[in-house]
Protein backbone atom coordinates (compact mmCIF):
# COMPACT_ATOMS: atom_id res chain seq x y z
CA UNK A 1 0.00 0.00 0.00
CA UNK A 2 2.87 2.41 0.81
CA UNK A 3 4.19 2.07 -2.75
CA UNK A 4 0.92 3.43 -4.11
CA UNK A 5 1.08 6.72 -2.22
CA UNK A 6 3.69 8.45 -4.44
CA UNK A 7 1.71 7.43 -7.53
CA UNK A 8 -1.48 8.79 -6.00
CA UNK A 9 0.24 12.07 -5.15
CA UNK A 10 1.55 12.37 -8.70
CA UNK A 11 -1.86 11.58 -10.16
CA UNK A 12 -3.56 14.18 -7.96
CA UNK A 13 -0.90 16.76 -8.84
CA UNK A 14 -1.50 16.00 -12.50
CA UNK A 15 -5.23 16.54 -12.00
CA UNK A 16 -4.56 20.01 -10.56
CA UNK A 17 -2.19 20.87 -13.40
CA UNK A 18 -4.63 19.62 -16.03
CA UNK A 19 -7.47 21.68 -14.56
CA UNK A 20 -5.36 24.84 -14.62
CA UNK A 21 -4.14 24.09 -18.15
CA UNK A 22 -7.67 23.53 -19.42
CA UNK A 23 -9.56 26.24 -17.54
CA UNK A 24 -6.99 28.91 -16.68
CA UNK A 25 -6.81 30.68 -13.31
CA UNK A 26 -8.87 28.91 -10.64
CA UNK A 27 -9.57 29.47 -6.97
CA UNK A 28 -8.89 26.62 -4.51
CA UNK A 29 -12.63 26.00 -4.30
CA UNK A 30 -12.93 25.80 -8.09
CA UNK A 31 -9.93 23.49 -8.26
CA UNK A 32 -11.44 21.24 -5.61
CA UNK A 33 -14.66 21.05 -7.62
CA UNK A 34 -12.84 20.44 -10.90
CA UNK A 35 -10.58 17.69 -9.53
CA UNK A 36 -12.74 16.11 -6.85
CA UNK A 37 -9.94 16.62 -4.33
CA UNK A 38 -10.46 17.93 -0.78
CA UNK A 39 -9.73 21.63 -0.50
CA UNK A 40 -6.85 21.13 2.03
CA UNK A 41 -5.18 18.83 -0.50
CA UNK A 42 -5.63 21.42 -3.24
CA UNK A 43 -3.91 24.02 -1.07
CA UNK A 44 -0.97 21.65 -0.54
CA UNK A 45 -0.63 20.90 -4.25
CA UNK A 46 -0.74 24.61 -5.12
CA UNK A 47 1.96 25.38 -2.55
CA UNK A 48 4.03 22.48 -3.87
CA UNK A 49 3.78 23.72 -7.45
CA UNK A 50 4.68 27.24 -6.30
CA UNK A 51 7.71 25.91 -4.42
CA UNK A 52 9.18 24.46 -7.64
CA UNK A 53 8.25 27.47 -9.75
CA UNK A 54 5.48 25.76 -11.71
CA UNK A 55 2.60 27.90 -10.41
CA UNK A 56 1.84 31.33 -8.99
CA UNK A 57 -1.15 32.91 -7.32
CA UNK A 58 -2.91 36.07 -8.43
CA UNK A 59 -3.86 39.05 -6.27
CA UNK A 60 -7.29 37.47 -5.67
CA UNK A 61 -5.70 34.15 -4.58
CA UNK A 62 -6.38 32.22 -7.78
CA UNK A 63 -3.85 29.61 -8.86
CA UNK A 64 -2.12 30.10 -12.21
CA UNK A 65 0.42 28.01 -14.09
CA UNK A 66 3.74 29.84 -14.36
CA UNK A 67 5.61 30.79 -17.53
CA UNK A 68 7.98 27.92 -16.78
CA UNK A 69 5.45 25.70 -18.54
CA UNK A 70 6.12 27.66 -21.75
CA UNK A 71 9.78 26.65 -21.56
CA UNK A 72 8.72 23.04 -21.11
CA UNK A 73 6.42 23.34 -24.11
CA UNK A 74 9.32 24.76 -26.15
CA UNK A 75 11.55 21.89 -25.08
CA UNK A 76 8.87 19.33 -25.92
CA UNK A 77 8.32 20.88 -29.33
CA UNK A 78 12.04 21.07 -30.10
CA UNK A 79 12.37 17.37 -29.24
CA UNK A 80 9.82 16.56 -31.94
CA UNK A 81 11.85 16.77 -35.14
CA UNK A 82 8.72 16.70 -37.28
CA UNK A 83 7.89 20.21 -36.05
CA UNK A 84 11.37 21.72 -36.36
CA UNK A 85 10.27 24.15 -39.10
CA UNK A 86 6.75 24.74 -37.84
CA UNK A 87 7.36 28.18 -36.32
CA UNK A 88 7.96 29.82 -39.70
CA UNK A 89 4.84 28.22 -41.17
CA UNK A 90 2.71 29.39 -38.24
CA UNK A 91 4.08 32.94 -38.44
CA UNK A 92 3.40 33.14 -42.16
CA UNK A 93 -0.17 31.87 -41.77
CA UNK A 94 -0.86 34.28 -38.90
CA UNK A 95 0.42 37.19 -41.00
CA UNK A 96 -1.69 36.12 -43.96
CA UNK A 97 -4.93 35.66 -42.01
CA UNK A 98 -4.35 38.19 -39.21
CA UNK A 99 -5.67 35.51 -36.85
CA UNK A 100 -3.98 33.44 -34.16
CA UNK A 101 -2.61 30.12 -35.40
CA UNK A 102 -2.13 27.06 -33.17
CA UNK A 103 -0.22 23.81 -33.54
CA UNK A 104 -1.60 21.11 -31.26
CA UNK A 105 -0.88 17.41 -30.82
CA UNK A 106 -3.01 14.60 -29.39
CA UNK A 107 -2.10 13.49 -25.88
CA UNK A 108 -4.52 11.03 -24.29
CA UNK A 109 -7.92 12.68 -23.92
CA UNK A 110 -6.65 16.17 -24.76
CA UNK A 111 -5.32 18.29 -27.58
CA UNK A 112 -2.17 19.98 -26.26
CA UNK A 113 -0.88 23.20 -27.81
CA UNK A 114 2.87 23.04 -28.49
CA UNK A 115 3.27 26.26 -30.49
CA UNK A 116 1.39 29.29 -31.73
CA UNK A 117 1.68 32.48 -33.74
CA UNK A 118 -0.35 35.17 -31.95
CA UNK A 119 -2.80 37.30 -33.89
CA UNK A 120 -5.34 39.89 -32.89
CA UNK A 121 -7.35 39.54 -29.69
CA UNK A 122 -5.18 36.77 -28.24
CA UNK A 123 -6.13 37.72 -24.69
CA UNK A 124 -9.56 36.09 -25.02
CA UNK A 125 -8.42 32.80 -26.51
CA UNK A 126 -8.52 29.63 -24.40
CA UNK A 127 -5.50 27.93 -25.93
CA UNK A 128 -1.81 28.84 -25.65
CA UNK A 129 1.45 26.83 -25.57
CA UNK A 130 1.38 24.27 -22.78
CA UNK A 131 -2.39 24.46 -22.37
CA UNK A 132 -4.91 22.00 -23.71
CA UNK A 133 -8.45 21.48 -24.89
CA UNK A 134 -10.69 18.52 -24.09
CA UNK A 135 -11.65 16.41 -27.08
CA UNK A 136 -15.27 17.54 -26.98
CA UNK A 137 -14.66 21.28 -27.34
CA UNK A 138 -12.86 23.72 -29.62
CA UNK A 139 -11.60 23.19 -33.13
CA UNK A 140 -8.42 21.36 -32.12
CA UNK A 141 -10.13 19.17 -29.52
CA UNK A 142 -12.95 18.06 -31.80
CA UNK A 143 -10.53 17.53 -34.69
CA UNK A 144 -8.47 15.14 -32.56
CA UNK A 145 -11.67 13.40 -31.46
CA UNK A 146 -12.55 12.70 -35.10
CA UNK A 147 -9.26 10.79 -35.44
CA UNK A 148 -9.44 8.97 -32.12
CA UNK A 149 -8.97 5.22 -32.45
CA UNK A 150 -11.16 4.26 -29.50
CA UNK A 151 -13.98 6.67 -30.28
CA UNK A 152 -16.66 4.37 -28.88
CA UNK A 153 -14.80 4.01 -25.59
CA UNK A 154 -14.36 7.76 -25.24
CA UNK A 155 -17.99 8.54 -26.00
CA UNK A 156 -19.25 5.82 -23.67
CA UNK A 157 -17.63 7.53 -20.67
CA UNK A 158 -19.53 10.77 -20.14
CA UNK A 159 -17.92 11.58 -16.80
CA UNK A 160 -15.89 14.74 -16.87
CA UNK A 161 -17.46 16.23 -19.98
CA UNK A 162 -18.21 19.60 -18.45
CA UNK A 163 -19.59 22.24 -20.85
CA UNK A 164 -17.27 25.20 -21.31
CA UNK A 165 -20.04 27.36 -22.81
CA UNK A 166 -23.72 26.96 -23.63
CA UNK A 167 -22.68 25.70 -27.09
CA UNK A 168 -20.29 22.98 -25.90
CA UNK A 169 -21.33 19.53 -27.06
CA UNK A 170 -21.15 16.91 -24.32
CA UNK A 171 -23.82 14.45 -25.49
CA UNK A 172 -22.40 11.31 -27.11
CA UNK A 173 -24.87 11.38 -30.02
CA UNK A 174 -24.10 15.01 -30.83
CA UNK A 175 -20.35 14.35 -30.67
CA UNK A 176 -20.67 11.29 -32.89
CA UNK A 177 -22.54 13.36 -35.49
CA UNK A 178 -19.84 16.02 -35.24
CA UNK A 179 -17.16 13.38 -35.84
CA UNK A 180 -18.97 12.22 -38.99
CA UNK A 181 -19.21 15.82 -40.22
CA UNK A 182 -15.52 16.46 -39.54
CA UNK A 183 -14.46 13.31 -41.37
CA UNK A 184 -16.65 14.13 -44.37
CA UNK A 185 -15.38 17.67 -44.91
CA UNK A 186 -11.85 17.22 -43.58
CA UNK A 187 -11.87 20.01 -41.02
CA UNK A 188 -13.65 21.20 -37.89
CA UNK A 189 -15.46 24.50 -37.52
CA UNK A 190 -15.72 25.69 -33.92
CA UNK A 191 -17.98 28.64 -33.06
CA UNK A 192 -18.39 29.67 -29.41
CA UNK A 193 -18.14 26.12 -28.03
CA UNK A 194 -14.85 26.67 -26.16
CA UNK A 195 -15.02 30.43 -25.54
CA UNK A 196 -17.99 32.72 -26.19
CA UNK A 197 -17.32 34.97 -29.16
CA UNK A 198 -14.34 32.93 -30.36
CA UNK A 199 -14.24 30.57 -33.32
CA UNK A 200 -11.65 28.36 -34.99
CA UNK A 201 -11.06 26.29 -38.09
CA UNK A 202 -8.96 23.19 -37.43
CA UNK A 203 -7.33 20.90 -39.99
CA UNK A 204 -5.48 17.59 -39.49
CA UNK A 205 -1.78 17.14 -40.15
CA UNK A 206 -1.33 13.53 -41.28
CA UNK A 207 1.61 11.23 -41.82
CA UNK A 208 2.14 9.09 -44.90
CA UNK A 209 -0.17 6.40 -43.51
CA UNK A 210 -3.01 8.80 -42.83
CA UNK A 211 -2.39 8.81 -39.07
CA UNK A 212 -2.90 12.04 -37.16
CA UNK A 213 0.32 13.82 -36.25
CA UNK A 214 -1.19 17.07 -35.09
CA UNK A 215 -3.67 19.80 -35.78
CA UNK A 216 -3.36 23.26 -37.31
CA UNK A 217 -6.04 25.75 -36.33
CA UNK A 218 -6.83 29.36 -37.17
CA UNK A 219 -8.69 31.15 -34.38
CA UNK A 220 -10.24 34.56 -33.84
CA UNK A 221 -13.61 36.25 -33.43
CA UNK A 222 -16.44 33.88 -34.33
CA UNK A 223 -18.05 36.33 -36.75
CA UNK A 224 -14.79 36.73 -38.68
CA UNK A 225 -14.00 33.02 -38.71
CA UNK A 226 -17.48 32.29 -40.08
CA UNK A 227 -17.47 35.08 -42.67
CA UNK A 228 -13.97 34.34 -43.97
CA UNK A 229 -14.17 30.57 -43.60
CA UNK A 230 -13.25 29.68 -47.19
CA UNK A 231 -10.36 32.15 -47.24
CA UNK A 232 -8.94 30.80 -44.00
CA UNK A 233 -9.42 27.20 -45.13
CA UNK A 234 -7.44 27.77 -48.31
CA UNK A 235 -4.59 29.42 -46.40
CA UNK A 236 -4.56 26.73 -43.71
CA UNK A 237 -4.57 23.90 -46.26
CA UNK A 238 -1.49 25.35 -47.92
CA UNK A 239 0.23 25.53 -44.53
CA UNK A 240 -0.77 21.95 -43.68
CA UNK A 241 0.76 20.74 -46.96
CA UNK A 242 4.10 22.30 -45.97
CA UNK A 243 3.95 20.84 -42.45
CA UNK A 244 3.13 17.37 -43.78
CA UNK A 245 6.01 17.57 -46.25
CA UNK A 246 8.41 18.66 -43.52
CA UNK A 247 7.20 15.85 -41.22
CA UNK A 248 7.72 13.30 -43.99
CA UNK A 249 11.27 14.54 -44.59
CA UNK A 250 12.03 14.40 -40.87
CA UNK A 251 10.73 10.83 -40.75
CA UNK A 252 13.01 9.82 -43.62
CA UNK A 253 16.02 11.31 -41.88
CA UNK A 254 15.23 9.34 -38.71
CA UNK A 255 14.77 6.05 -40.58
CA UNK A 256 17.85 3.79 -40.56
Image (cartoon, rainbow, N blue to C red):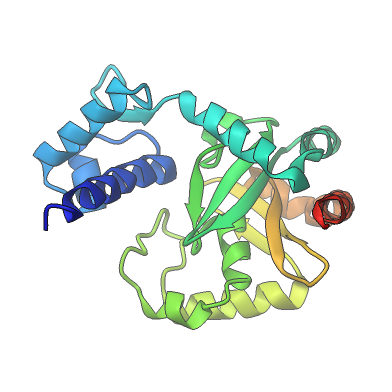
Q: Is residue 208 above or below residue 138?
A: below
Q: What is the x, y in percent for residue 201?
A: 70, 55
Q: Residue furthest front?
A: 256
Inspect this view and state whether residue 169 appears. yes
In-front residue for pair 189/6: 6
- Seen in the picture, residue 242 relative to 87 is either above or below; the reply is below
Residue furthest to the top in view is: 59
Q: Residue sitting at 66 percent across and 40 percent down?
A: 79
Instruction: From the viewer's perspective, tell me whether residue 56 is left or right of residue 228.
Output: left
Identified at 65% across, 51% down, the residue is 200
Quadrant of image for the C terminus: bottom right
Q: Is residue 195 visible?
A: no
- Indicate whether 14 appears above or below 237: above
- Near-viewer residue (88 or 59): 88
> Along the horizontal axis of the image, is 51 left or right of 251?
left
Pick whichever, 81 or 253, lies toward us.
253
Residue 245, image x and y in percent? 89, 54
- Number of numbered callouts drawn: 0
Q: Residue at x 86, y 50 (%)?
A: 253
Quarter of the image with the N terminus is bottom left
Query: As drawn, is 98 to the left or to the right of 16?
Result: right
Q: Quadrant of residue 88?
A: top right
Q: Position of residue 137 (x, y in %)?
A: 50, 59
Q: Of 10 and 111, which appears nearest the observer? A: 10
Query: Viewed as shown, does residue 18 lie left or right of 94?
Result: left
Amino acid sequence: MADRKPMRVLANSQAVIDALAERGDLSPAELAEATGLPRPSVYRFIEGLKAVGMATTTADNRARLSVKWLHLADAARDAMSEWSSARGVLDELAARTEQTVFLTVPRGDEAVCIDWAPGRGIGVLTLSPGRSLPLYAGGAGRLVLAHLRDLDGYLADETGRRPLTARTMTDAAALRADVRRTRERGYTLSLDDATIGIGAIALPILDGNGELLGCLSVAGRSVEIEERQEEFLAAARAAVAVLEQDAAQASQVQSP
